[in-house]
Each structure stands twice: as structure tokens, then as C-alpha cells.
Image: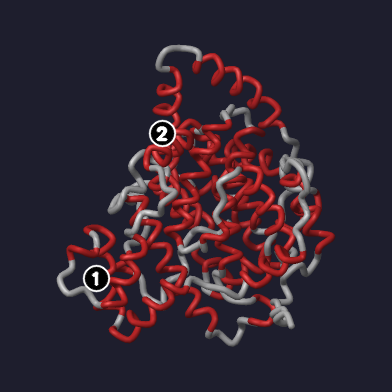
Amino acid sequence: MPPKPKVLPARHGADLLRARQVAAPIRRFIQGPAEPSPAQWQAIGESLMQGDAAMDALLDWMSEAGLAQSIPLYQRALEQGIAAIDEAPQPLQRLFAQVEATPAWLDTDLLDEGARVCCLSGLTGMRVLRDLGLLAGYQASAINRTLVLTGALENGAQRRIAETSKWWVDCTRPGGMARGAAGYRGTLHVRLVHALVRRRVSGMAEWDASYFGLPVNQGDMHATYLAFSVVFLIGQRLLGVPLSKDERGAVLHLWRYIAWLMGVDQRWLHIDENDATRALYHNLLAQAPADASSHQLGTALIDEPLQRHYPNLQWLRGRLNRAIHLSIARTFIDAEGRHALGLPRGVLPWYPLLTAPPRYLLHRLVRCLPGGRQWLSERGDRQQQAYLLTLFGDSHPRLVSAGQVSEADSPAAGTHA
């Protein structure tokens, strides 16, 4: 007799009609059948109840040993490797034996190629992540619930954008995901913060596990990973950055490894772009519809460009960037979604319409020149670094170090998709 299917959280497919409308822009990019099979649908539901067993087990030990003593050991292992710690505790050894064992499928040259492709996107890439990944993602109210309960709404949209952007840039520089490099450290730092948040929120009386499942679960981490890869690639097409199939494959390979380090289960990692796009569509169907938290987060993000640290013309540049972001969001979020997020009415998709054609021509022409692709990549890197400076201002652009994390102030993972 086959095993009885597990009872799934009520959020799973809570409003399929609305979910299909939200996911419609993704559906257009899928070749072949798009709908999940019954087995796939069941697996997605079950993923909402699954965490990160390896990191959760390490956190059990860290809590028993005391975070003040154990987190510095974790930080040292991040920076120097587990071999640098004499007589490292067994729980720490087990986790780092896993993360330092390079997966058989990993191609380090392809990682660096994926990073160069991310640089090619320049400022366009940062805008896509913000508007099509983060803002559009706020329609998924069940993911928002963790932000609400940890107080991340009070921390401010500008901080979330800054920290997420810094992590993304660290991960997407050539060599950034090498052991001990900034992207590698940042990714494992976020993984620890996710575990802290999972433990803290799941113990709150306000957390309804029968509806939400587990905080920061496999399904929601899967959605975040696909936002940084699939949504990023779709956004490049919409805004006129031409990428070849091999270039898109390199980006997917890079984010496959980042997600693996983040603790996303192997079954949710993708090689083929069409398979990854279909998986994102399936995931979006499972998400709960927008609620009041979507409006809170969306309206806070609208005015985020006004809070940046521009070197000059603060008033003008803030309002111009605000208009640009709203215009990009207009191309991807339907009228009901824009209303749920609190976006103003009457916004036109002027920015993509006016800038995508000349951007496409520029990239095509420059790539025909000797060294043209490298020039575009270096130019894009400078744009992204300058963008970070406008977000952080005089403060050093970095994530909070793992040594500063505690269960009381752990919500700022910054990777909400």
C-alpha cells in the first residue's frame, strides 16, 4: 500500500487563479508543457515544511555551546577553512566537510564566466533584481511573514536593498565564490542567518505552521535562487542586454553553486534554463497571494531611491530613479499586483521601451570590436560598484559579519526573492 501523502501547509496553492496571473510573465518563456505533475506539486508542498538539516544541526550545537563562543569559530572556518582550526568541534567539522567538498558537477571556469556575464548587465542587472525579483516577489505574502515577525519591516527598505546588493555583487565577481572569498563567506553567512531566523520564528506564537509551513524553508529558498538566476536572465532580455545560450548557462551554473552552498537541496538545483524557468513557474503557483504585508513592503520600496547617497543632484536623481524603477515594474507586474503592492496608478513602461533598443544595439556593436565584451564587462562592474556606493554612502559596503549575528538580531539576511 503506497504511503499516505503528507498534509501540506494551507498556503500551498492557496489561490491558484491569482497565482497563475502573477506567474503569467514567466509562463511566456517556457518551452513545452508548463504545468506541474501531481508528484511535482506534492513535492513543492512538502518543501515548504523542510529546512536546512545540516545547518540546523550545527545551530543546535552552537546554541548549546553559546553563540558568543561558537560564532567566532564559524567565522574563522569561513575565512581560513576548517583545517585552520585545531581540534574543531565535530558539528563544525561535519558542516564544513560538506561545504568544502566541491560537488562533482562544479566547473570553476564556468563560475567565473557566469560572474563576467553578470557584470555585463551593469546597472540594468541591479535594476532587474530590485524591481522584477525583490519588488514583484513581495506579492508572495507567506514569504513576507518572516520579514514581518522578525521586524525587518522596521529596518527599512534601503537597508534590505543595500545588503542584498552587496551580497549579490560579492558573489558575481570572478573568483568571488572561491573558498574564503567574499561571495563564499557572504553566502554561508546568510545560510547561518537563515537558520537563526528559522529557529526564532518557528517558536513564535504568531507563526501558524499549519498555514505557513516552516520559516525559510526549501521552497522559499528555491524561489530566491530562481529569482537571482531565472528572473535576472528574463530581465536582461526585457531591457535589451543580449546574452547567448552559453552565457545564460554560465549564469545558471554560478547560481546553482551559490544555492548549493546556501543549503538548497540538490533536487531543486537546475542545469537547463527551460527546466529552471518551469520550476520557477511551479513555485509561483504554490505561493500565497498578496496581503497587507505586500502593501507595506511595496510602498516602502517605492521611495527607496530617494534615500540613496548620490554624490550630487540628490533631489533630481532620486526622483528620476524612482520613476525608472516604477516603469520597469510596470512591464512585469499586472494591475492587480501593482495595486496590492501600493504602486501608483498611471505609470507607463517608458523606460524599457525607450532604452532597450539602443542598449541592445550598443551591446551588439561593441561586442563586434576586439576586446569589446571585456570592455562591457569592466564598464558594468564599475556601474555596479558605483551603485553600491549610492546605497551605502560613507558606511563601508558590507554584510554584517557572522560574528555580529545573534538570535535576537538575526533577521537581516536580505535575500527575500
Residue in the image at 49% along x and 50% along y: 256
- Say which mark, if any, is on residue 271: none
Q: Which colouring convention does the figure follow? A: secondary structure
Residue in the image at 41% along x and 33% along y: 381
Relative depth, front residue between 211 and 397: 211
Alpha carbon of mark 2 to alpha carbon of mark 1: how far? 33 Å
Assign the N terminus to one quadrant of the image. Answer: bottom right
Where does label 2 land, which residue?
381
Q: Position of residue 171 (x, y in %)?
A: 41, 47
Say whether residue 121 is left or right of residue 46.
Answer: left
**Is any atom of residue 389 visible in this view?**
no
Kind of residue indicated by mark 1: Leu
From the image, state whether disc 2 or disc 1 is nearer to you. Answer: 1
Secondary structure at numbered mark 1: helix
Where does label 1 land, which residue?
73
Earlier residue among tags 2 and 1: 1
Residue in the image at 68% along x and 70% along y: 45
Q: Residues within 10 Å of mark 1 (few under 14, many from 20)?
A: some
Q: Residue furthest top?
A: 369
Kind of residue indicated by mark 2: Asp
Relative depth, front residue between 280 and 395: 280
Say whether residue 169 is left or right of residue 94.
Answer: right
Q: Position of residue 269 (x, y in %)?
A: 55, 55
Tell me if residue 180 comes above or below residue 114 in the rendering: below
Say whether residue 231 is left or right of residue 281.
Answer: left
Residue in the image at 28% along x and 84% along y: 65
